[in-house]
Structure formats: C-alpha cells, structure tokens
C-alpha cells in the first residue's frame, strides 16, 4: 500500500491520514458488496441445512416403511421356547410345538495313553468343504488341536484329560444342524491318512448333527439353528427344550412326532409404537423449525441473509403441513393418515402424538399403522421420498437449482469486489502522487521564503 514517507513534513498536514480517510470513503462500495455476499452465503447455507433435514425426514419415514412402525410384544409365557417380537411383528396367536433341538456335529478321538500323534494328514469334511491339516510325526495332541484351530476349519478343537492317564481330542462343528438337502453326516466328517511312524494314529467316532424340528399351527418346519426367525411372522423364537409328549424318531436321522403345543401370543405395544412414531415426529419438527426460522424474520432484519422471500421454502412448508392429513389408499377401516393415529399439529407448526388417540387407533386397526407409511405411491414414505427428490435431486431439484443460482451470484460479487479493489488502489496511488507533489511545491516555497527572510 503506497504511502508518503515524509508525509506532512513541508506542509505540516497529516497527509497519510488524509489519504487513508479518502480511500476509506471510496471503499464503502466494497463493504456493501462484502455484506451482500455474506448474506447470499447465509442463504446457501440455510438451503443446505433444509436439504439435510429433509433427507433426515426421508430416512426416518423409509425406516418405518421398511421395518414397520407398529410395536408388538410377546404376552404369553412359554416353556419349550422363548419369543421376541421383531420390528415387522403383527399381533396374533400361534400354536407351537418343539419336537427336536438342533445340535452340532461332534467327533471324539480314541483314548491316547501317550501324548504323541503319528504324522500324516487329518482331513475335515464340513458342509461340502474339505480342510486338510498336516500332522507332524510325534507332535502332541495339544499342538494338533492348535493347528486345527488355525486351519480355518469352522470347528473347535479341545484336548480332554480324564485324570487316569487317558487323553482325548474333541472336535465340535461351530454351526449347528446340517443342510436340509443333505445328510446329517455332511455336517462333519473326519479321516486320517498316516505317513509317519511315531506315536498313535488318531481315529474318530462322529456324532452326527441334527436339525431343529417344530410345528407351528399344524405346519412342520425344520431349521439348522435353535434360533428361528423366519417361521412366525415378526417373531424370533429361541428353542430351549422339547415340548411335553414328543415321540423321538424311530431311527437315527428320522423325524420326531407328537408333542403338546403351546400358545404363542403377540399383542400390540402402544408404547413402542409411539416411540417409533416419535422418531418421525422429531425429524419433521426439526425440519419445520428450520423453515420457520427462515420465514419468521424479525422486523428490520437483513432479508438478504435469509430465505423469507423464497417461494421454494414456502412451498415446502405447505407440503409438510399437508403430510399429516395425507391418506394412504386401500385402507378401509378409517385409519388412513397420521391424523388418524393421533399425530396432531400445534399452533407453532410442530407435531405431537396423542397417546389416547393412538391407543384407540391400534385397537381399531393395528395393521394400518405400517400401511400408512409403506403403501406404494400414497404412503408417507413414498410421499416424503418424492418430496425429497423434488427439492434436493442433483441437477434439477428446487433447492439445488436455487443454490446454483446463489453460488453464481457469489462469484459475480467476488469479481465485482476484485474490480472495485483495483479501482480503489489506483485512487490511492493517485492521491499519493498528488499530495507528494503538493509537499514538494510547499517545500520549494518555504525554501524561497526562508531565502527572502534571510
């Protein structure tokens, strides 16, 4: 920045200060442009915040559509199994009989009186995959068990000592049951090919795996695990014991029969339902609060720094307000919208849940709770997804286009400020030259005056 190094030395004036003041006055336009640009940046940021909150609302509604908004709980007490309701649960009653529990295949070696194992290859055939374990000649049972665990085979390997001089190598498949299209022996097979001469060659007795058998409402099911999630809709069953009166299979690998069924009862859970709906309500209220912050501008506020005059924001507000009364098609019980579930709009535009109204709606048609969110085209999830696309889609979303326009305006303001800054700098340089010339003239006249005075 140019200055007069001997400013005011001849004239006695503070010429540098005078130049600074004149330049400051000339720079007012730059400050106005900076203020305008700051306001436009605030608008871009506000649009980004609204887009983010609209996306959060879309995520919340899609979650309720996919996983269900209805809360269900198990109300029965059962002895052969326990049941836990899942997010997709529906109220109902089921007759369940546990006829067989799933077990894992096991293999136990013969007794080793000496700890040395003969060398060779131990092959483990597990569900169609073979794992070969190299056995060093004379290695210990403990080392062999460790090598089996490190082989990647899905089995546990443990050495047992009976305390009277005998050791056993025990293998247990990690997964219970066996593929229903195969034989029980497919769960675990063990063979040994000896190549060494030291120690004892291992030989294994295998106990085959068995699958769980259960009967639900007269239908027979077979599963590889005692945790059954795909039989009773919306419930996860954990089988723990056989039902009373079960007849075991006549031969190994056969099917059990009989048994006394227990009643599994699942009922609606108003508290869980309200908790799930609250996730949607909270996301809605966060978005509505952000909109109102932009639209409800105090008198005298800088409107260039908010979206008070933006029609796209007002349009979004109107669409959100209509969401509560949006009805899903195909529902005939009178429970078709959020309003029917007890979701109410307050004077400030935010939503709340009327617990009593929700309980009444659940008693009238519990299944409608999920349908209000998941119904194609007209459900809340589809409506909010379409809304989110309209406003935030890349390229032609209303918010996206508006942000692009504002960003272009920001760039123009940046260019204008750069041009103004150049003009102001030239103005400063002109002032410096003029005041420097003045100081030179005054200095010359002072020299003449001093000469004449002497």
Image (tube, rainbow, N blue to C red):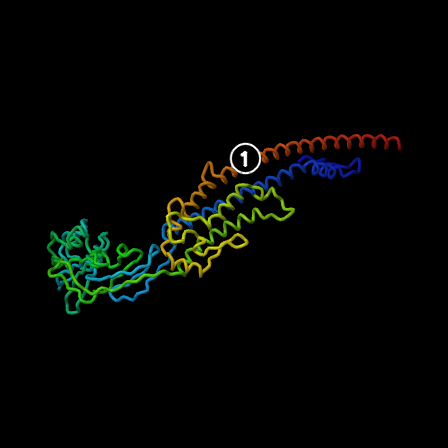
Q: Of all residues shown, which one is farthest toward the bottom?
A: 164
**Residue drawn 46% across the image and 57% down it:** 353
Vertical arrangement, residue 95 with respect to residue 408, above or below: below
Report crowding for label 1: few under 14, some 14 to 19, many 20 or more residues within 10 A (C-alpha). few
Vertical arrangement, residue 115 with respect to residue 23, above or below: below
Quarter assignment of residue 255? bottom left
Q: Is residue 310 visible?
A: yes
- Badge 1 element: helix
Quarter assignment of residue 154? bottom left
Q: Position of residue 303 (x, y in %)?
A: 61, 43
Q: Quick one: 262 or 25, which is closer to the camera?
A: 262
Quarter assignment of residue 250? bottom left
Q: Is residue 171 left or right of residue 70?
A: left
Q: Position of residue 259 (x, y in %)?
A: 19, 64
Quickly name the residue at label 1.
408
Quadrant the C terminus occupies: top right
Q: Position of residue 347 (x, y in %)?
A: 54, 54
**Residue drawn 77% across the image and 37% down it:** 8
Quadrant the N terminus occupies: top right
Q: Quick one: 263 or 331, which is closer to the camera?
A: 331
Total marks shown come to 1
Q: Is residue 8 left or right of residue 179?
A: right
Q: Of all residues shown, which one is farthest toward the right?
A: 453
Vertical arrangement, residue 424 with respect to residue 132, above or below: above
Q: Position of residue 383 (x, y in %)?
A: 43, 45
Q: Quick one: 343 or 350, which is closer to the camera?
A: 343
Q: Quick one: 85 or 449, which is closer to the camera?
A: 85
Q: Is residue 445 left or right of residue 237?
A: right
Q: Is residue 143 visible?
A: no
């Amino acid at each position: 920045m140019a200055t007069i190094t001997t400013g005011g030395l001849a004239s006695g004036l503070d010429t540098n200060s005078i130049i600074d003041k004149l330049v400051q006055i000339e720079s007012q336009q730059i400050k106005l442009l900076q203020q305008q640009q700051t306001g436009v940046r605030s608008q871009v940021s506000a649009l980004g915040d609204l887009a983010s909150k609209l996306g959060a609302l879309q995520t919340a509604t899609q979650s309720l559509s996919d996983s269900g908004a209805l809360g269900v709980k198990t109300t029965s007490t059962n002895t052969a199994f326990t049941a836990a309701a899942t997010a997709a649960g529906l109220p109902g009653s089921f007759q369940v009989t546990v006829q067989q529990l799933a077990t894992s295949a096991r293999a136990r070696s013969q007794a080793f009186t000496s700890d040395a194992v003969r060398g060779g290859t131990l092959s483990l055939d597990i569900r169609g995959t073979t794992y070969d374990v190299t056995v060093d000649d004379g290695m210990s049972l403990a080392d062999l068990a460790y090598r089996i665990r490190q082989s990647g085979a899905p089995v546990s390997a443990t050495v047992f000592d009976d305390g009277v001089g005998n050791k056993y190598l025990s293998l247990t498949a990690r997964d219970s049951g066996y593929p229903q299209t195969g034989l029980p022996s497919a769960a675990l097979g063990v063979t040994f090919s000896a190549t060494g001469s030291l120690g004892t060659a291992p030989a294994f007795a295998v106990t085959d795996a068995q699958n769980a058998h259960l009967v639900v409402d007269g239908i027979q099911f077979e599963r590889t695990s005692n945790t059954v999630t795909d039989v009773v809709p919306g419930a996860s069953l954990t089988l723990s014991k056989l039902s009373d009166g079960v007849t075991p299979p006549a031969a190994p690998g056969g099917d059990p029969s009989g048994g006394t069924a227990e009643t599994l009862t699942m009922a609606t859970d108003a508290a869980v339902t309200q908790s799930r709906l609250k996730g949607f309500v909270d996301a809605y209220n966060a978005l509505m609060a952000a909109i109102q912050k932009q639209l409800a501008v105090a008198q005298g506020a800088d409107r260039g720094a908010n979206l008070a005059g933006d029609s796209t924001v007002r349009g979004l507000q109107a669409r959100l307000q209509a969401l509560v009364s949006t009805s899903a098609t195909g529902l005939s019980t009178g429970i078709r919208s959020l309003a029917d579930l007890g979701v109410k709009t307050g004077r400030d535009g935010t939503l709340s849940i009327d617990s009593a109204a929700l309980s009444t709606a659940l008693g009238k048609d519990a299944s409608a709770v999920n349908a209000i969110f998941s119904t194609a085209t007209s459900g809340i999830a589809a409506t909010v997804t379409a809304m989110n696309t309209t406003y935030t889609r890349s390229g032609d979303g209303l918010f996206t286009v508006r942000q692009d326009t504002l960003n272009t305006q920001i760039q123009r303001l940046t260019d204008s400020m750069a041009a103004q800054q150049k003009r102001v700098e030239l103005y400063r340089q002109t002032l410096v030259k003029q005041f420097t010339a003045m100081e030179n003239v005054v200095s010359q006249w002072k020299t003449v005056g001093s000469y004449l005075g002497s």
